Image (cartoon, rainbow, N blue to C red):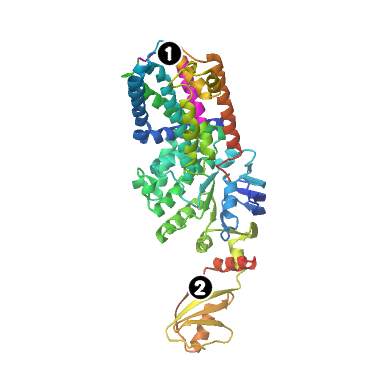
């Protein structure tokens, strides 16, 4: 049992190291683009359009949208890291290195998720650094901020893993980010407070899980939120548990990996 | 070591499209064996290997690796196995030394332990100079050798090779043969599938022939080869042969004016053949087996099974 534990720990470290090296080697593709994208958002939405919008809850428009932009960068890159890494390893068949080895399913999942989370956090750090030139960076609760970023990143790493299991071709790894994640993120209140929406749309917006992530992060940074922060955490935790259970189930039946 | 290296009991595989790839096969491979698993394409060799290494899920049956049931304790069972798959499956953007140390990590071997072992293997297999190269930069033969190194990095007791020399040139093949013999002599049990029957004949102690998901034959290589009643020889003569040339008691087929094919009983001596031809004024310059003995038997057995 002890041997199995140390084996799984060494294997986990190996997967994480491999994942981190993978995205670090291609830092120009993984760490620089989110900086450029966010700078464009700050200039266009924050400065040019934001000046006409004025303040929201006594924050400038740039300050108001920053938590949402930060979260969008973190979750997008966590997701992309896991889905692309898993799918490429399936495509080139070197996933078999893991499958024939004595690694448990939970170790494989934990390794890939950690890789995604580390990339998400790395992107978060560079975006925060870039934002210093445009945003009045404030933190309401650093602990809360770290927890929200960590849980959001974990959730989307797992979603990416799930997508990677089901993906059979390159199109499949773009369908969910393009047609589901991006619309939900944009409609999740990055650029607006849902209190600005008509009542019917406010109710519809509440069904969007990303709304809770954005509001939880906005609360941790600016101290303002459109939804109950306790309920937001409840939703984030429930989704984490649900997606984790799905990943473990599909790994156990070998979906997309074993014949 | 009392438990066999591999014990397969009633192994059955039915794919989701209804194709039955394995019909309840049984196999026992003792520790220290060099075992050939042969069969035509689609016979069930790769399915069997896939199930042993858990890349394919079995429908029914039991597998034990050194007495450990893979369903009950797959972690321990899998630490005993090293696999050289049929197709190249590296991360092509990873340097060679990383491929080996990562693979070791998946088996619970720390990097500190893996680095000297990787150096040993890379030197032995002639890849040390390439250790910082990406695997995609290697030639086909080098990639084959790297696959062997990767399978051995955690020092498995049971090495499974699925057509390890496919596409490799003669030099690489000889190097691999020597290395596999060395491993086997030093206690590694080896299971080999190959389409080069000469390879199996030269290396393996025991053999199983599988076709249509059934084991047609499982015996020692020596007993199996003894079943060959006659063999076909190609003779090159100094003087030209006429089209109607024949010798009583010999089955001769003229190929061209200086070449003929002769079928003789394995009990007959070559001297008898040469003497009989000499009596007819034919001098033999050289001769060779038309095919390897194993190939001859393999073809007959598979033909008999309806192929």
Element type at mark 1: helix
Tag 1 and tag 2 share a subunit? no
Residue A10 visible in the shown view: no
Residue A184 visible in the shown view: yes
Q: Residue A157: where, in percent of width, then height?
A: 49, 30
For the record, the magenta segment spans A136-158
The residue to which callout 2 is attached is B290
Is A1 on the left-hand or right-hand side of A193?
Answer: right
Q: Residue B105: where, in percent of width, then height?
A: 47, 36
Q: Is A142 placed above or below A111 here?
A: above
Q: Residue B159: where, in percent of width, then height?
A: 53, 49
Is most of the magenta stretch helix, strand or loop?
helix
Q: Residue at x 35, y 21 (%)?
A: A49
Dot 1: chain letter: A
The residue to which callout 1 is attached is A222
Q: Is B289 placed above or below A47 here?
A: below
Q: Any magenta on residue B154? A: no
Is B120 on the left-hand or right-hand side of B246?
Answer: left
Q: Nearer the viewer, residue A36 or A203?
A: A203
Q: Is B215 placed above or below B280 here?
A: above
Image quarter where the N terminus of chain A lies is: top right
Dot 2: chain letter: B
Q: Residue B201: where, in percent of width, then height?
A: 53, 62
Element type at mark 2: loop
Find the distance from the CA under tag 1 to the CA under tag 2.
85 Å
Q: Residue at x 42, y 46 (%)?
A: B121
């Amino acid at each position: 049992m002890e041997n199995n534990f140390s084996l799984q720990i060494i294997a986990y470290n190996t997967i994480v190291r491999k994942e981190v090296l993978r995205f670090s080697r291609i830092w120009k593709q993984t760490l620089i683009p989110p900086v450029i994208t966010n700078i464009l958002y700050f200039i266009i939405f924050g400065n040019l359009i934001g000046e006409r919008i004025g303040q929201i809850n006594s924050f400038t428009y740039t300050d108001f949208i920053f938590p949402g932009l930060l979260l969008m960068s973190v979750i997008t890159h966590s997701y992309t890291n896991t889905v692309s890494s898993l799918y490429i390893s399936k495509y080139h068949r070197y996933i078999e290195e893991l499958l024939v080895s004595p690694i448990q399913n939970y170790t494989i999942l934990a390794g890939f998720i950690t890789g995604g989370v580390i990339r998400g956090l790395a992107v978060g750090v560079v975006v925060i650094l870039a934002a210093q030139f445009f945003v009045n960076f404030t933190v309401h609760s650093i602990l809360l901020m770290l927890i929200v970023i960590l849980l959001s990143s974990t959730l989307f790493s797992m979603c990416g893993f799930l997508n990677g299991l089901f993906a059979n071709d390159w199109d499949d790894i773009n369908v969910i980010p393009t047609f589901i994640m991006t619309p939900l993120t944009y409609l999740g209140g990055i650029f607006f407070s849902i209190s600005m929406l008509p009542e019917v749309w406010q109710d519809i917006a509440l069904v969007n899980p990303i709304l809770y992530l954005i509001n939880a992060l906005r609360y941790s940074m600016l101290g303002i939120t459109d939804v109950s922060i306790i309920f937001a955490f409840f939703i984030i935790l429930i989704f984490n548990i649900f997606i984790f259970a799905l990943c473990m189930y599909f790994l156990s039946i070998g979906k997309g990996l074993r014949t | 070591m009392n438990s066999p290296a591999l014990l397969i009991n009633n192994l059955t595989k039915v794919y989701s499209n209804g194709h039955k790839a394995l019909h309840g096969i049984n196999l026992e491979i003792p520790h220290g064996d060099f075992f050939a698993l042969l069969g035509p394409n689609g016979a069930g060799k790769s399915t069997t290997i896939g199930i042993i290494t858990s890349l394919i899920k079995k429908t029914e049956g039991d597998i034990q690796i050194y007495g450990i049931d893979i369903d009950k304790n797959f972690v321990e069972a899998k630490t005993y196995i090293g696999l050289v798959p049929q197709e190249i499956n590296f991360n092509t953007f990873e340097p060679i030394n990383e491929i080996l140390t990562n693979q070791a990590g998946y088996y619970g071997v720390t990097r500190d332990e893996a680095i000297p072992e990787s150096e040993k293997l890379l030197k032995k297999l002639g890849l040390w100079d390439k250790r910082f190269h990406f695997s995609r930069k290697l030639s086909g033969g080098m990639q084959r050798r790297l696959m062997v190194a990767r399978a051995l990095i955690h020092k498995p007791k049971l090495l499974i090779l699925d057509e390890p020399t496919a596409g490799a040139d003669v030099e690489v093949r000889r190097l691999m043969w020597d290395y596999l013999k060395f491993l086997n002599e030093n206690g590694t049990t080896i299971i080999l599938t190959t389409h080069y029957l000469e390879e199996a004949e030269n290396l393996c102690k025991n053999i199983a022939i599988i076709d249509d998901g059934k084991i047609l034959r499982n015996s020692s290589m020596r007993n199996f080869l003894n079943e060959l009643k006659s063999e076909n020889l190609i003779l090159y003569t100094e003087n030209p042969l006429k089209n109607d040339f024949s010798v009583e008691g010999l089955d001769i087929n003229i190929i061209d004016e200086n070449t003929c094919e002769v079928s003789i009983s394995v009990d007959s001596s070559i001297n008898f053949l040469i003497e009989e031809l000499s009596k007819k004024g034919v001098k033999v310059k050289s001769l060779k087996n038309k095919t390897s003995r194993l190939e001859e038997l393999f073809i007959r057995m598979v033909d008999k099974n309806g192929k």
